[in-house]
Image (cartoon, grey):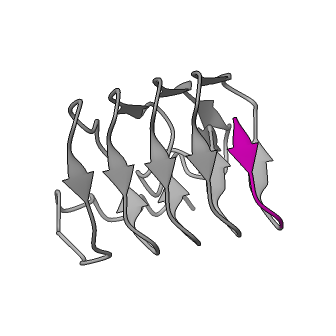
Amino acid sequence: MFINQGCFFLDYGGITIGDRVMIGPRVTLSTAGHPVELDERYDFITHAPIVIEDDVWIGAAATVTPGVTIGRGSVVGAGAVVAKDVPPLSVVTATSVVERKRLKPASTAT
């Protein structure tokens, strides 16, 4: 395993790193977050494990979010934001914004 400088690992939900994994500088692995619904957002912290299988290369300044598995032999491009599982032997890149759903407005308690 090779881990470069300036990385940030938030291991609240568990991080598993396989054999021969290379992690570039400034990579963030974050297993914790907050609920997305506005009424719940400040109530508690969510968490889910990150699994990085054997022979993975994660490029500089990539971010891996909670609950993601990066499959064996895959490459995560520099600056990528990984928010869903990466199949084995894949190359993934990008930081594009994709709207996943619309949130409910906050309740107005008086």
Residue at x 24% of width, y 78% of height: 96
Residue at x 50% of width, y 54% of height: 58
Residue 107 to residue 21: above or below: below
Say whether residue 55 is left or right of residue 98. right
Residue 28: quarter of image: bottom right
Q: Quadrant of the C terminus?
A: bottom right
Measured as percent of width and height from the top left, residue 26 is found at 70, 69
Q: Which region is colored magenta?
A: 1-5
Q: Is residue 41 rendered magenta in the image? A: no
Q: Quadrant of the N terminus?
A: top right
Measured as percent of width and height from the top left, residue 18 is found at 57, 22
Pick the residue in front: 45 or 76: 76
Q: Is residue 83 visible?
A: no
Pick the residue in front: 45 or 28: 28
Residue at x 77% of width, y 56% of height: 8
Pick the residue in front: 62 or 36: 62
Q: Is residue 95 visible?
A: yes
Measured as percent of width and height from the top left, residue 95 is found at 32, 75
Residue 22 to residue 94: above or below: above
